[in-house]
Amino acid sequence: MTASDVSVPIAQTQEIPWWLILIQGIFAVLIGLLLVISPGVTTFVLIQFLGFYWLISGIFGIVSIFIDSSLWGWKLFAGILGILAGIIQNPLWSTLIVPSTLVIILGVEGIIIGVVNLIQAFSGGGWGVGILGALSILFGILLVANPLVGAATLVILLGILGLVGGISAIIYAFRVR
């Protein structure tokens, strides 16, 4: 048996069709534009869709217990959470609460990352890490102190990110084609 007799399976990569990337890019640009042009209304609509998705997903999660009873406790828990998230959703409150909660989580995360960076700086990581840590703590405190302002800013930043990501995806789709 020689080396040429041994066949090594080559991992087959599945390529995403270029038109699917193009469609994703177009939707990202549209949502990005809507978030930049009209952040309040767009956030309201997106959160309403998310609420309906959670409600339907929760119902399907509970129904799936009867089809496949493995991990039924987690499926029941996720199903109940999904249904509650979908039902409790008041259009006005959810538009304010969801982005604000995300901003608070990002603020706490920023504070934690900043503390870790400061510890690294004092352990020999250098001034750069220390300055970044201090800035991260400062921005984290600002986000936690005023989540509504952070939420309004976050929506516009997500819109810009959607525009940039969507345009990049469109360009990439035509390059792949």
Image (cartoon, helix red, strand yellow):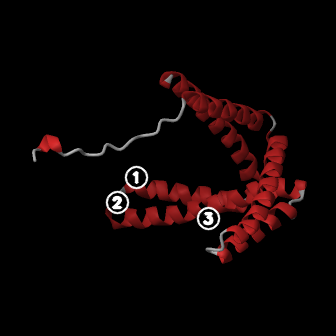
74 versus 154 height, above or below? below
Q: Position of residue 24 (x, y in %)?
A: 63, 34
CA distance for labels 1 and 2: 8 Å
Mark closer to the observer (2, 3): 3
Query: Considering only order in the chain, which callout, 3 or 2, is on the residue closer to the N terminus?
Result: 3
Identify the amino acid type marked 2.
Answer: Gly
Q: Which mark is residue 11?
A: none
**Going 59% across and 26% down the picture, which residue do you hit?**
170
Classed neighbour count for the residue bearing mark 3: other residues with Cα under 10 Å, few (<14), some (14–19), many (≥20):
some
Question: Which numbered marker is on residue 108?
Answer: 3
Quadrant of residue 137 within the rendered picture: bottom right
Closer to the chain start, of discs 1 and 3, is 3
Q: Which residue is mark 2?
A: 125
Under circle 2, the secondary element is: helix
> Circles 1 and 2: CB distance less than 8 Å?
yes
Q: Nearer the viewer, residue 111 or 85?
A: 85
Q: Are marks 2 and 3 in contact (CB under 8 Å)?
A: no
Asked which secondary structure carries label 3, the reply is helix
Residue that extends furthest to the left in the rendered view of this protein: 2
Q: Residues within 10 Å of mark 1 (few under 14, many from 20)?
A: few
Q: Identify the residue shown where x is 63% and y is 60%.
A: 107
Q: Which residue is mark 1?
A: 128
Between 65 and 154, the one nearer to me in the picture: 65
- Residue in view at x 57 percent, y 59 percent: 110
